[in-house]
Amino acid sequence: MVPQSLFPNGRWLLCEPKYFDVTYEINPWMSLKRTPERTRAQQQWQALHHTLIRLGAWVEYVDPLPKQPDMVFTANAGLVIGKRCILTRFKHAERQGEEAGYRTWFEQQGYEVVVAKSGFFEGEGDALFAGTTLFVGCGFRTDPAVEGELKQLSGAKELVMCELSNSYFYHLDTCFCPLDAERALVYPGAFSSTSLARMAKYIRLIEIPEADARRFACNMVPLGKRVVVPAGCSATYELLAKEGFEAAPVELDEYMKAGGAAKCLCLRL
Ligand code: ARG
C-alpha cells in the first residue's frame, strides 16, 4: 500500500461508471424519464478523475458490479478511519447489492471491516469528519439509532447528529462540507433549525445560496487549499476564495440525474 505521507491530499476510492445509469428512483433527482447520457457521463467522470490526480490525490479503484448503477457513488461504501472501515448498510434494497463488492475490496486491502448493527448507515455520504468531530446526517437514509455505536466504532471525540429536512438533500454530503476542523460550507435550507443551531456550536458555518446548493455546490472535495466543485456555482467559488480556497470546477450534471456530484463519487481512504 502507498504510504499516506506521499500523498498529502489523501487516498481516494473511485468506481468507474461502467454500469452507471438511472434504473430506479430512490431520491427526488432520479427519474426514469431522465436517464444519463452514457458517453457524457464517462467523459465527466474522467474529468473528475483527472482533476483529483492533478491536484495531488492518490486514487484507488473498486470494481463496478453489473446491475448496480449507483456503485459509482463510492462515498456510500462506508466510513474509513485508519485501517478500519465501517461498512455501509444501505436503506434501499436497490443498493444493497453493492455492499458485497465494497466488503471484498476492503478485506482484500487488509482493512478491518465492521458494521453498525443498530441501523442503516450510508457511509461518508452521511458522515463527515471535521478534525475529531464527526457530523452524521439522518432523516432520510442513516438511522438516528446508530449514533452511539458509530461514536464508539469511529473513535470520534464528538459526534453531532444533523437532522436533514429537505428530501432533495437526503445525504449529509449534499448540503454540508467541512473545509477543515474550523469551518464548513452549508446549505441551511436542508436542515431542521435545531440541528443547524447544534452544528453551529461545533463549527463555523459558511452559508451558500439555494441556487448553488441545487447545483450540488456542497458536494465538493477539498484537497489542501484547492477544492473540486461542481461547475456553475460561482457564488460558492467566491465564498471559497474569501476563505483562502481555490475552486476547481468540474461539469457533473449527468451524475446529478442520479442525485450525486463530486464528493459522492469518491471516498476518503
Ligand atoms: N442515487 C444514489 C442514491 O440515491 C446517489 C447517491 C449519492 N451519494 C452521496 N454520497 N450523496 O443513493
Image (cartoon, rainbow, N blue to C red):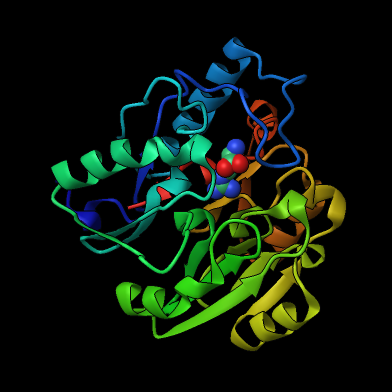
Count of numbered labels shown in the rendering:
0
Q: Quick check: 258 above or below 11?
A: above
Residue 90 in picture, x, y percent from top left = 47, 49
Q: Quick check: 238 above or below 95?
A: below
Q: Quick check: 242 above or below 60?
A: below
Q: Quick check: 177 above or below 263?
A: below
Residue 18 in picture, x, y percent from top left = 44, 18
- Left or right relative to 77: residue 145: right
Question: Going 50% across and 74% down the picture, which residue do you hit?
Answer: 145
Q: Nearer the viewer, residue 206 or 97?
A: 97
Quadrant where ligand 1 appears: top right
Q: Is residue 100 visible?
A: yes
- Left or right relative to 110: residue 175: right
| Furthest residue in direction bottom, as rendered | 201
Q: Nearer the viewer, residue 169 or 253?
A: 169
Q: Is residue 59 visible?
A: no
Q: Nearer the viewer, residue 236 or 30?
A: 30
Residue 156 in picture, x, y percent from top left = 38, 79
| Furthest residue in direction top, as rendered | 39
- Left or right relative to 227: residue 62: left
Question: Going 61% across and 23% down the picture, which residue do you hit?
Answer: 23
Residue 116 in picture, x, y percent from top left = 36, 65
Question: Going 80% across and 49% down the picture, which residue do you hit?
Answer: 212
Question: Going 20% across and 60% down the picture, which residue do you hit?
Answer: 83
- Left or right relative to 228: residue 192: right
